[in-house]
Structures are given as structure tokens and as C-alpha cells.
Amino acid sequence: MTLRLRPFGPDDEAAARAAHHAMAAEGFTFLLDFDPSATWGDWLENVATIREASNIPVDRVPAAFLAADVDGDVVGRVSVRFELNEFLAREGGHIGYAVLAPYRRRGYATAMLDQALVVAHGRGLDRVLIVCDAVNVASAAVIQRCGGVLERVVTDAAVPYSRYWIDTEHASRRRELPG
């Protein structure tokens, strides 16, 4: 089974809403800027606006919000931010990802981050910041597997977090290698 990142589409509504609900139970937001009372088409349009960087709200940055797809099933999502605002530069980072509970521990997070690095490099980012909770050993391992170098652990935050930097050029070259 091969994982691929792709834009969310009209056929993803049921799976995405279910994923959003499941991740909310874990205290995590699966669909960013999602209003359950809005139409799916409105949300898709909002995501496209942010990706195209046209008329985005001042508190947002241009970004790609992508589904992680394995054989037609949404197993997770990734957000690749092409710029950093003050919050993202401090504790949000360029890339955020989530894997749904039934699909964890199968290498999907690593594949997602690896492909997200290629997306970031393609948009001109040579180096990206990735942040995870300091106690999230699984996420730290994924980041390190993809070339993440720990900058520091921030302990004076409400939830301590680790800041990693990854050189996207190396990730892009690694992804282009055959086999």
C-alpha cells in the first residue's frame, strides 16, 4: 500500500468529518478552520483560497492542506505552511500532520512528512521548522527519521515542545532516488 498526499475533494466529506470527530476526542483538530455547520464546498473553497494565497485572512499564511490517502482511504492529513507568522515561528512550524488512530504505527506519518518536505521544497523552502509536544516520542522519532535536527526544547510553555529543523533539499533528493 502506497501513501500519497493529495488535496481534499468533494468525495472526502464523510471520511473527513468522521476523522475530524475522531481526532476531536483526542483533543486534536483534524480539519483546520472547519465549521461543522458550513457546507463541505465552503470548506474546500477556503482551503483552496489559502493554498492560492488569494485574499487570505491576516492571521493566516499560504499553505497546502492535504489528505493522506492509502488505496482511497483517508488515513491522516498534513498542513504545509509556506510562510511563518509570529505564532508559527514560535511554536507552530511549517508542517503539521496527524494520523488517524487505526492507521498508526504503520510508517504513514514518516511517509506523510517525507512527502510534505518535497512539497515545501517545491515551494522554495530550503529549511523547515517542525514542532511537536516534548512528550510525543513517536512524532519526534518521525521528525528525526526525516532528517530533523533538534534546535531546543521549550520548557516554559503551557505544554513543553521540541523545535526541529529539516533541510528540505536533502529530503527532496532522498525522495527522488529510485527504489
Image: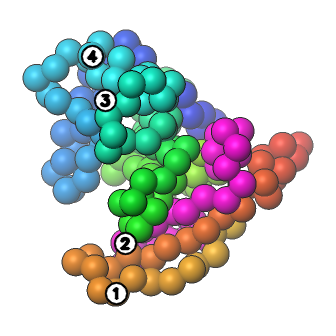
Type of residue at label 3? Ala
Instruction: Identify the residue shown where x is 19% and y is 39%.
Output: 21
Find disc 1 in the rendering and name its residue.
155
Q: Give the mark nearer the N terminus: 2 vs 1.
A: 2
SS class of the residue under badge 2? strand
Q: Nearer the viewer, mark 2 or mark 3?
A: 2
Given residues 101 and 92, the one toward you in this image is 92
Q: Nearer the viewer, mark 1 or mark 3?
A: 1
**Vertical arrangement, residue 147 with respect to residue 38, above or below:** below
**Vertical arrangement, residue 122 with respect to residue 42, above or below:** below
Q: CA distance from mark 1 to mark 3?
A: 33 Å
Q: Which residues are magenta?
A: 117-145
* 33 with respect to 148 (left or right): left
Find disc 2 in the rendering and name its residue.
133
SS class of the residue under badge 3? helix
Given residues 161 and 109, the one toward you in this image is 161
Q: CA distance from mark 4 to mark 1?
A: 39 Å
Q: Give the mark nearer the N terminus: 4 vs 1.
A: 4
Find disc 4 in the rendering and name its residue.
42
In which quadrant of the rendered image does the N terminus lie?
top right
Q: Residues within 10 Å of mark 1 (few under 14, many from 20)?
A: few
Find disc 3 in the rendering and name its residue.
16
Type of residue at label 4? Asp
